[in-house]
Image (spheres, rainbow, N blue to C red):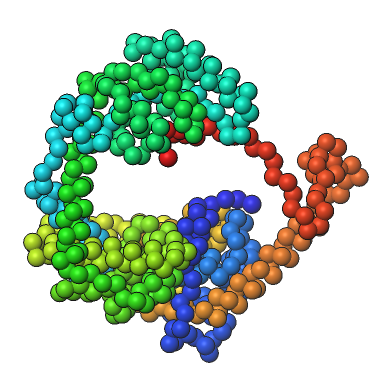
Amino acid sequence: MKRSSLLVLVVGAASLVACDGLKEALTAHVDVVARAGSQELSVTRLSDLLGKARIQIPINKDVATLVARDLWVPYQLLGAAAAKGDSLNDPKAIDAAAAGMIDQAKLQKFMEGLAATMPSDTGSQASYESGANGLYAARHILFLVPKGSSAAAKDSIRRKAESVRAQVTAANFADLAKKYSDDNSKAQGGELGVFPRGVMVKPFGDAVAALKPGQISPLVESEFGYHIIQRNTWDEIKGQYSQQAGDRTKQAAESLYITKAQADAQVKVKDNAASIVKTIAKDPITHRHDSDVIATWKGGDFTAGKLATVIFSDPRGAQLSQQIGSLPDSIIRRYVEQMAQRELLLQRADSAKMGPTPEQVANLHHDFVQAVTVAWQALRIDPKSLADSAKTPAERERLAASRVEAFLDKVMAGEAQPLPIPAPLQIVLMDKYDYKLNAAGVDRAVERAQKIRTVADSTRAANQPKSAVPLPGTPGAPGQAQPPAAGRPAPMPDAGKKAPTQPARP
């Protein structure tokens, strides 16, 4: 079976489920999964798409919902708009749909202005050499001791490390690191760059802090093995150090500002916030207008709809939805608190008139129009193409719908990549044109698709050529392991042990 980026899309959105409790759930049409404009997605059509797919995707409710709601619905709505000659280029609608992106631009501008007023460590030589701000820079040579090594093996590695330590000088350190080190820093001569002491395992961090710039340590033992460490000189690291020192102090100052702002505003998370957030995460676009308050502060509140907009507009929205569904309530409450802090800062940004510049707004509108054009062309439903082939609006709508279905056929056959529709464009389409999703129809489509897949798999297996002699690589063939007894898991192969990619870091 072919692989497609649809599989990636499915995995990333695995936690998104169908809308529950829709007042108009199409209960009278259980053979219909979804409607978009005048088009219907039938149970038979969706189950055929899933069950007969030639790409590797699981068949379950999450995947069926993804295909129906996040592909079929916006594609068909794009077709409806194209058939009507609707450019979708309404500045007010675009601004409303892109509110999450606009808020992010405002917040970034506000925080940049705030950072410019805060004191910053200039990253002086004196602060580096004294370690006053906790930043260090070093290179090392690691002699990895695999977990479970015998005492004899560990002793052999230690003696090798001691032998190399006797040869090390400031002049040849990088060359010996490239030759002997057992981690991925060896290609850079053991360079680890600038780091806070606390991010390293304690024996390593303590050893670096005890060195003066340019000094080389005796052998240092950590949970990873044995290290030979040299602390970088000021001249070697001053550019990188100065940048990180400045960023570090600004981050600390920003954190203090946010903490104080939250304390002053008395941010409080509602008791039922976690359960509401989990519901939102399942289908954020449906909950964009929810008015339930999940957090408050002096002078404002944070609603479920606002959080839904933030999640849906985030490029990592599917990933966030998946994570939220598996988190404990305590972590979700902390997340709500952070989002309330964000809303509080946005309120201050609005007071400071930190809105996007006219140029940013123009770029946003341009990108939106470009996204519409690209989608129309990819689906072969741009208005000109439809008008050239169909005379009436109804004919153009039918033609657009058929081309969308043909595109989906190619996606499920692995002959085309799924077309992701940007969040603002989805919002504009779903706000302007009618669409429905029927949870019962999704369930029926999944059940039928699973049967189709089972029959196809059985047919494929039955059509395999028989052979009196087991083929190489099959159970029972000479030299092959026998299958485990029924109910007993097969033993895991011994994959060996790999060196950590960054042994000194936790």
**502 or 2, which is in the foreground?**
502
Using the rendered view, name the quadrant where residue 199 is placed. top left
Task: Judge left or right: residue 19 versus residue 255.
Answer: right
Using the rendered view, name the quadrant where residue 341 is placed. bottom left
- Spot occupied by residue 117 in the image (x, y as percentages of width and height): 8, 48
Can residue 193 be seen here? The reply is yes
Can residue 74 be seen here? The reply is no
**163 or 8, which is in the foreground?**
163
For residue 92, above or below residue 38:
above
- Spot occupied by residue 308 in the image (x, y as percentages of width and height): 34, 70
Task: Judge left or right: residue 488 versus residue 57.
Answer: right
For residue 282, above or below residue 291:
above
> Dividing the image into 4 quarters, which one contains the C terminus?
top left
- Spot occupied by residue 241 in the image (x, y as percentages of width and height): 23, 31
How many numbered circles does the render carry? 0
Using the rendered view, name the quadrant where residue 32 is placed. bottom right
| Residue in the image at 55% along x and 21% along y | 157
Task: Judge left or right: residue 179 versus residue 450.
Answer: left
**49 or 461, which is in the foreground?**
461
Task: Pick out the residue farthest to the right.
Answer: 468
For residue 240, above or below residue 380:
above
Task: Pick out the residue farthest to the bottom.
Answer: 28
| Residue in the image at 17% along x and 49% along y | 253
| Residue in the image at 44% along x and 18% along y | 178
- Spot occupied by residue 424 in the image (x, y as percentages of width and height): 30, 65
| Residue in the image at 28% along x and 18% along y | 214
